[in-house]
Image: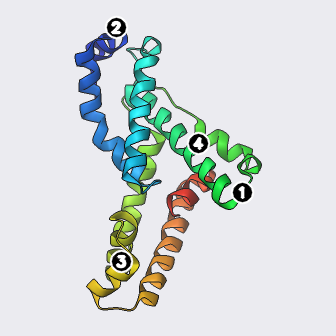
Amino acid sequence: MFDIQTKIELKKGNPDAFKEVFRLLYPRLKGYSKLFISNDSQVEDLIQETFIALWDHKESIKPDKTIESYVFVILRNKCLNFLKKQKLEKEQVDIENLNIEELQFLYQLDFTEKEDKSLEEQLIESFKAAVEELPGKMKTVFTRCKIEGKKQKEVAEELGISTKMVEKHIAKAKQQIREKLIRQYPALIVLIAMLLE
């Protein structure tokens, strides 16, 4: 997405280059974060922290490598750290006992000379495709509850169905999406589980 000159200027600390990177990446980063964290304020904080980290480490930018992957991995780590902390606080889950191979795969960053899609972008696209393949009403319920963030009761009233039916649609949708994503990304079970919470 970004030409070499933009990367060079960013590396030098040019504010205009930084603003351009922010302008172009912000919508994608926000959409990515919202898959894992529903709180808008927290999402904004994590994205802000990500760009602060990018600015603080701009000297390490390599003009011949992709900025997108670099920024996405920073945000990925921040999202995961937030979710881990949240789980430990609310559920007392021992995150450190998660499968090491899964976490290593999850944290891998593939810097290539091509502007290839990052692992996160591929997973997001697959997630969206899986949602699109859901049956009519199930898709509507899942989208409104889990993507738009509406309350189950509100969606039930909108569609003229019971809250119990809304819950069933969501459960079935999660199962179908999970099965599809795990077939495509068997080593990303941890991230897929977080995505579908």
Q: Which residue is mark 2?
A: 12
Pair 3/1: label in front? 1
Numbered circle sitting on residue 81: 4
Disc 1 is placed on an element classified as loop
Numbered circle sitting on residue 165: none
- Contact? badges 4 and 3 (CB < 8 Å): no
First in sequence, mark 4 or 3: give its number.
4
Gap in angstroms between the C-alphas marked 3 and 1 = 29 Å
- Contact? badges 4 and 2 (CB < 8 Å): no
Gap in angstroms between the C-alphas marked 3 and 2 = 48 Å
Numbered circle sitting on residue 93: 1
- Residue 141: quadrant of the picture: bottom left
Residue type at numbered disc 3: Val
| Residue at the spot 51% in from the left edge and 63% down from the top edge | 196
Is 37 drawn above or below residue 109 in the view shown?
below
Crowding at label 2, few (<14), some or many (≥20) Cα neighbours within 10 Å?
few
- Residue 55: quadrant of the picture: top left
Disc 4 is placed on an element classified as helix
Gap in angstroms between the C-alphas marked 4 and 3 = 29 Å
